[in-house]
Amino acid sequence: MSKELTLEEIQNFKGKYPKQIWSLFFSEMWERFCFYGMRGMLVFFMIDQLKFEEAQSQLQYAAIQAFVCAFTFVGGLFADKILGFRKSLFWGGILMILGSILLATDPHNFFFLGMAFTVVGTGFFKPNISTMVGELYKKGDDRTDAGFSLFYAGINLGAFLGGYVCIAIGKGHMLTDIIDVAHRWNVAFGLAAFVMLISLINFFFTERHLGPIGLQPRKLLPSGETVRMPMWKEISVYVCTILSIPLIMAMVKNTDYTDYFMYTVGPLTLLYLFYEMTKVTAVERKKLYAALVFIIFSILFWGIYEQAGGSLSIYAAKNLDSNLLGLNLDPNGVNNSGGAFFIILIAPLLGLLWIWLAKRKIEPNTVIKFGLGFIFLGLGYYVLFATKFFANADGVTSLNFFTLALLVITFGELCLSPIGLSIMTKLSTRNLQGMMMGMWFLASAYGQYVAGIIGANMSKSAVVGGDNLDRLYAYADGYKEIALYAVIAGVVLILISPLVRKLMQDVK
């Protein structure tokens, strides 16, 4: 049997990337296929199959996505305190598989039950694999951002495949010769379960290369000795998870509960963080305050960005043609996978660019990168607004120009999201890494919540407008308004960057 690697041996890797990142890359890739495959189907499925109104479907979508992100905080907390990152990952993956199987069996009657399993499962899976990526690097390693950019490319390879294939099968744009109409949605949801199983199998056979990373925490005795975590605590997590499924289903099904949840969980989480901050040093406390700045601004970013799964899904279905550079493609599939496709192309190059700039000591600091992310996001939504000028009398506009907007938005996402994952690990204390990663995703939950409200308001204006052309104008004008908010936020971040840099101390 080969000797287990130590953390020091793993972190002292040569070259640009540690070899262990590839195991996490592929596990996350297939998990993101599952997640984004279902994400891309939700709004269309609710409108087309469950007969929801447009505004209600977006609020429902936002509720599902908000709880998905919120439970990453819970998953991170249990990983820190009881399960460890590896066991949390396996438990989350199993729950996601069960949710996908329920949806594949009967997506109409088991929709909310299946989504409840998926919500909780993603909460256990998502934050912990990202945290393990962070542990592959020493504090202050200039290659960390590049590693997260590569990892983010893996996320988006899965998102690209799942985002297009699942919705295309469900709508009948793929495999129509072998899948009958009655079972298209069953197969689409079932495919998500299959690829999630591949993700867990990959991790099972490669986790031995991770050394001590992600192992279950040990209980510290008064004598200073450490012993195995009591089994009853671990079993309690599993039991409580299963018992919470009906509660999660009720909250996801009724968007009013989402309001109550969002009004309480954020303040309570902040209070708990402030309590934990009393236990750390003054320097560590400043770093955690800096992390909060990034978290708060990210709420606005995701509130605008996540129109992709809501209002843009409706826009793609009703206001876009199917011609992309001469190819006949499903516009919903392009909307769901276009951004991911561009990330696959750009992320590795951008990661190398950060390394090149760092060696010459001219790399923009993290705060500036965040600001640039907002500015690119705003510019992308200005391009979406401009699609109105290419519309015909039937309210159908260019998929080519829409895809250009996705490209611009992708530059914004790459300046913020992978760097956000990285900065949470850099600014966190060791015993709070899972919690801070969870808070990063909790901020995404609030962003999803805000996105649903924005999208629902745009949908109401579009419906009032009347014909399809008026609908297009209503959505386009809404995109112009939120584009302005994004640009302003980016400028503010750049202006306050010196203050935030002081809080960050030695973290770059």
Image (cartoon, grey):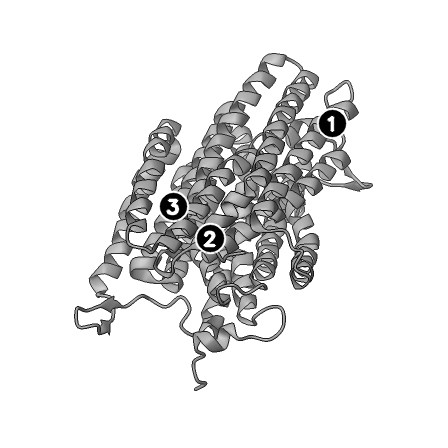
Residue where numbered disc 2 is placed: 424
Task: Tell which of 146 and 126 is nearer to you.
Answer: 146
- The circle drawn on residue 71 is 3
Residue depicted at 58% across the width and 63% down the height: 142
Query: 125 left or right of 451?
Result: left
What crowding class fits label 2: few (fewer than 14 Cα within 10 Å), some (14-19), or many (20 or more)?
many
Task: Tell which of 167 and 139 is nearer to you.
Answer: 139
Residue 186 appears anywhere in the view: no
Report, in whole angstroms, how far the alpha carbon at label 1 lies from the one at label 2: 36 Å
Q: Which residue lies furthest to the left in this view?
A: 222
Q: Which amino acid does label 3 sit on?
A: Phe
Indicate which label's residue lies in the foreground, 2 or 3: 2
Secondary structure under tag 2 reads helix
Establish if 271 lies above or below 223.
above
Residue depicted at 53% across the width and 38% down the height: 302
Q: Position of residue 289 (x, y in %)?
A: 41, 46
Precedes in sequence: disc 3 or disc 1: 3
Q: Which amino acid does label 1 sit on?
A: Ala
Report, in whole angstroms, how far the alpha carbon at label 2 lies from the one at label 3: 17 Å
Secondary structure under tag 3 reads helix
Residue depicted at 60% across the width and 33% down the height: 486
Q: Which amino acid does label 2 sit on?
A: Met
Establish if 438 lies above or below 359.
above
Residue where numbered disc 1 is placed: 386
Q: Position of residue 444 (x, y in %)?
A: 47, 41
